[in-house]
Amino acid sequence: MAEYKRVEPDLDFIKGVMESGGDTLNRCYQCATCSVVCPLSTPESPFPRKEMLWAQWGLASKVSGDADVWLCHQCGDCTAYCPRGARPGDVLGAIRANAIRYYARPRALAGILSKPSGVLGMVIAGMVLFFVAAALWAKVTGEAFPFPEGYVEYHKFLSVVPIDIVVLPIVGLIAWACYLGVRDFWGDIYRGAGLPLSYNGTASSPSFGILMTRYLWPAIKEILSHERFKKCGQTSERVKGHLWALWAFIILFAVTVYVMIYADVLGNLWPKAGFHTPLPLWHPVKIAGNVGAIMLIAGIWMIKTMRENKTREGILSSSTQDWILIWLIFAVGITGLGAEIIRLAQVKVLAYPVYLVHLGCVITLFVSLPYSKFAHLLYRTTAYVHQHYAEDIRAGKAGFGLEKPGRPAH
Ligand code: SF4
Ligand code: SF4
């Protein structure tokens, strides 16, 4: 006799998807055109038809444990061909927004950072934090506060040492939140893929060395070249803006690390040896920083323009989260470049406030990593890694303690 399973829909999940830009969800009648036209879907695990069904049924845990949701780049090809106007590309975007909230620790922060007022509040809180740090620093150095004497030099207002004292604990907490989110996500997508579990029900994962060399590095290479993104048809022009922004972040990260070592470590070890900021304009690291800032502004502007055009054409729909991230990154770029130009122009009354706004935007962008659309960086990378790891497990090349390629699984 056939066994029937009662579906218990998670109505809050359905409501959350519909409110995050997936309000066309119920139009889907399962024709599967979307899975056929999707340039990123695979024959072994086609999407997004199945995700549309699961989301309609309110199967929240099933959708959360589906790595395919993260292989979608919201190119809009499926949306263009859907005969029912169900906009599957946008529904998957809404599912991802919900998943980010689902894996956020603490979850309340994801709620706060999903609203423009919450982001603004976070920027202001960051500014207050740095302002207090600057006031305390002025007591240590004896500088006038809030406008130090003489030429505008930001290290007189707030050197890298107090910045690090504020930033490093925050970096530690955010890194921990990222770890918890990725760990839970990994467990869910592993179980969702029906892969063999250990005797106590835990998911297998590769050892650190194998993870880095066999799975993570190839995934990073794919992301750096946007190999999959380039297959998108309707919104292929998004690739350029995303690549510019991505490489700008990499350049700016490298510059930040250099400055930390140069000014924090060397500057403090040998205070009189001249290891301090600002670097001269002709310094290669300074040039790299400026190029990175210009690339960031240009890249995010391309993304913004493309999104506006495609939204107008009906190919994409854009949620508040999309715009929050775009404007926050834009604010980081423009205040960073602005602070430097104003410093060069020596407009003291503007320079320090703009610098403070820049620091507030940077810390907010960083804090938003596991809580906003920025978390795509974490979960999409994890989904890429999982896809290749799952292939290896199915081929008998990986699994519990058997991650070495070529060794058989039990
Ligand atoms: S989303 Fe559209 S194309 Fe995809 S199965 Fe549903 S009706 Fe068909
Ligand atoms: S938006 Fe693009 S990548 Fe995503 S499911 Fe549709 S066709 Fe595939």
Image (cartoon, helix red, strand yellow):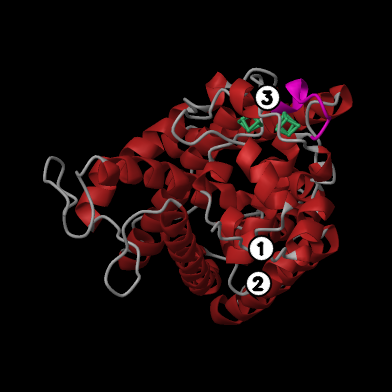
Ligand 1 near label 3 (Cβ, under 8 Å)?
Answer: yes
Residue type, numbered disc 3: Thr
What residue appears at the point 68 percent right and 70 percent down from the top-left corner? 109
Residue type, numbered disc 2: Arg
Q: Residue 30: tell me if it is visible.
A: yes
> Which residue is the site of mark 3?
33
Residue 222 or residue 205, whichever sits in front: 205
> Which residue is the site of mark 2?
107
Quadrant showing the C terminus: bottom left
Closer to us: mark 3 or mark 1? 3
Residue 287 or residue 42, whichever sits in front: 42
Q: Earlier in the sequence, mark 1 or mark 2?
A: 1
> Which residue is the site of mark 1?
101
Quadrant showing the N terminus: bottom right
Q: Residues within 10 Å of mark 2 (few under 14, many from 20)?
A: few
| Snapshot quadrant of residue 300 | top right
Q: Circle 2 — which element? A: helix
Closer to us: mark 3 or mark 2? 3
**Magenta stretch bounds:** 78-86
